Image: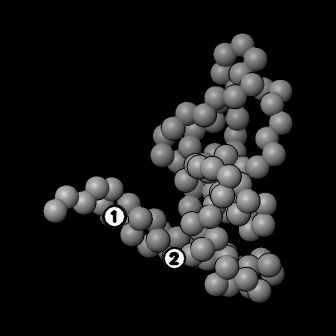
């Protein structure tokens, strides 16, 4: 996701996520956590993602996948490569949302 907020309308600003979702907020609103995960780019969904962001600077799913198993390296600044992230995103995007039997 782009971290670039642009003037939108009146006192609002807009940013476009990597999936093309437009995010609009008041220009004077302070953002305390990221709106999107710095690893996968998906939008933060709830309190669990907020807690994971506070500790690992990523969403809960990425914390489970990358940060927690590599806790020591993560705290030293290690992050998955772009190839590793892309493989992970491809696997997520290929999962069915509904299974009918």
- Mark in front: 1 vs 2: 1
The image quarter containing residue 67 is: bottom right
Residue positioned 57% across, 75% down in the render = 65
Q: How many marks?
A: 2
Residue positioned 80% across, 78% down in the render = 75
Instruction: Give the position of the C terminus as an image quadrant.
Output: bottom left
Above-or-below relation of 28 to 36 = above
| Residue underneath mark 1 | 95
Query: Distance of mark 1 from mark 2, alpha carbons?
Result: 17 Å
Report whether residue 13 is seen: yes
Which is more N-terminal, label 2 or label 1? 2
Disc ID at residue 77? none
Report whether residue 38 is seen: no
Residue that extends furthest to the front in the rendered view of this protein: 101
Above-or-below relation of 8 to 72 = above
Image x and y of residue 71, in percent? 73, 83
The image quarter containing residue 68 is: bottom right
Residue positioned 60% across, 74% down in the render = 64
**Callout 2 secondary element:** helix
**Callout 1 secondary element:** loop
Q: Nearer the viewer, residue 100 or 34?
A: 100
| Residue underneath mark 2 | 84
Residue positioned 64% across, 71% down in the render = 63
User: In the displayed structure, does residue 26 sit left or right of residue 8?
Assistant: right
Q: Are marks 1 and 2 in contact (CB under 8 Å)?
A: no
The image quarter containing residue 14 is: top right
Image x and y of residue 73, in percent? 74, 85
């Amino acid at each position: 996701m782009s971290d670039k907020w642009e003037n939108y309308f009146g006192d609002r600003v807009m940013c476009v996520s990597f999936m093309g979702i437009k995010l609009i907020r008041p220009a004077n609103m302070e953002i305390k956590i990221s709106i999107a995960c710095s690893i996968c780019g998906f939008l933060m969904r709830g309190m669990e993602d907020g807690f994971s962001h506070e500790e690992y600077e990523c969403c809960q799913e990425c914390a489970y996948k990358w940060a927690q198993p590599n806790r020591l390296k993560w705290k030293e600044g290690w992050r998955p490569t772009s190839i590793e992230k892309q493989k992970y995103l491809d696997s997520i995007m290929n999962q069915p949302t509904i299974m009918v039997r």
